[in-house]
Amino acid sequence: MNWRETLIFPPENPISNTSRDLIEKFCCNVDSRIGANSVDEIKSHPFLAGVDWDHIRDRPAAYTPDVKSITDTSNFDEFPDVDLNICRNTEIEHKNKDLVFINYTFKRFEGLTQRGMLKMTGASS
């Protein structure tokens, strides 16, 4: 994903400057990303100022889903079965299938791999 060109903050859904700053610090080059040096960079960001990091695991979850069994999917949205009309142009696929091998050459060096093929010079018999 090219976030430099695709990440936009729509004006109709405004977020705080602190939120925007944290998002932008996560969406950047690895070397300059927040947390690249230590997790303390993330913990000390103003957006997370109210988080009690020492007792975070002691707090109850904001939402605890009701799970009835290991196969329970009732917490997920329902999506009706829809026939997808995926048109595959096999002629184009067939035509372009070998493009990745352009300029590829293979040479078998049998003389180096088979015994007895190389003549030893200077060897006495």
Image (cartoon, grey):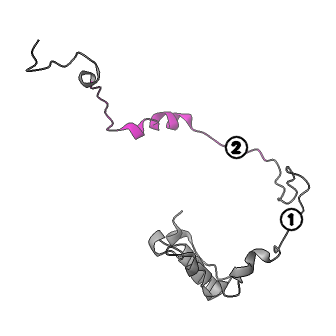
79 w.r.t. 64: above or below? above
Q: Residue at x 59, y 80 (%)?
A: 22
Magenta stretch encompasses residue 60: no
Q: Main secondary structure of the magenta part?
A: loop
Task: Out of 98 and 60, give the one closest to the viewer.
Answer: 60
Q: Quadrant of the C terminus?
A: top left
31 w.r.t. 70: above or below? below
Give the tally of numbered discs.
Answer: 2
Image: magenta residue range: 82-109
Give the image location of residue 79, x and y in percent: 81, 54
Give the image location of residue 35, x and y in percent: 54, 75
Give the image location of residue 108, x and y in percent: 29, 25
**Residue at disc 2, secondary structure:** loop
Q: Residue at x 85, y 49 (%)?
A: 71
Question: Three-letter amino acid code at disc 1?
Answer: Pro
Side of 70 where 124 appears, left or right:
left
Question: Three-letter amino acid code at disc 2?
Answer: Asn
Q: Residue at x 70, y 43 (%)?
A: 85
Task: Out of 63 and 101, give the one closest to the viewer.
Answer: 63
- Residue 65's disc number: 1
Q: How far separated are the C-alphas under marks 2 and 1?
A: 35 Å
Magenta stretch encompasses residue 94: yes
Side of 56 where 42 appears, left or right:
left
Q: Nearer the viewer, mark 2 or mark 1?
A: 1
Quarter of image, res 68: bottom right
Quarter of image, res 54: bottom right
The residue pinned by badge 2 equals 85
**Counting other residues with Cα less than 10 Å from the Cα at mark 1, is it few (<14), some (14-19), or many (20 or more)?**
few
Side of 72 where 120 appears, left or right:
left
Residue that protrudes farthest toward the right in the picture:
68
One can see residue 15 in this view: no
101 w.r.t. 52: above or below? above
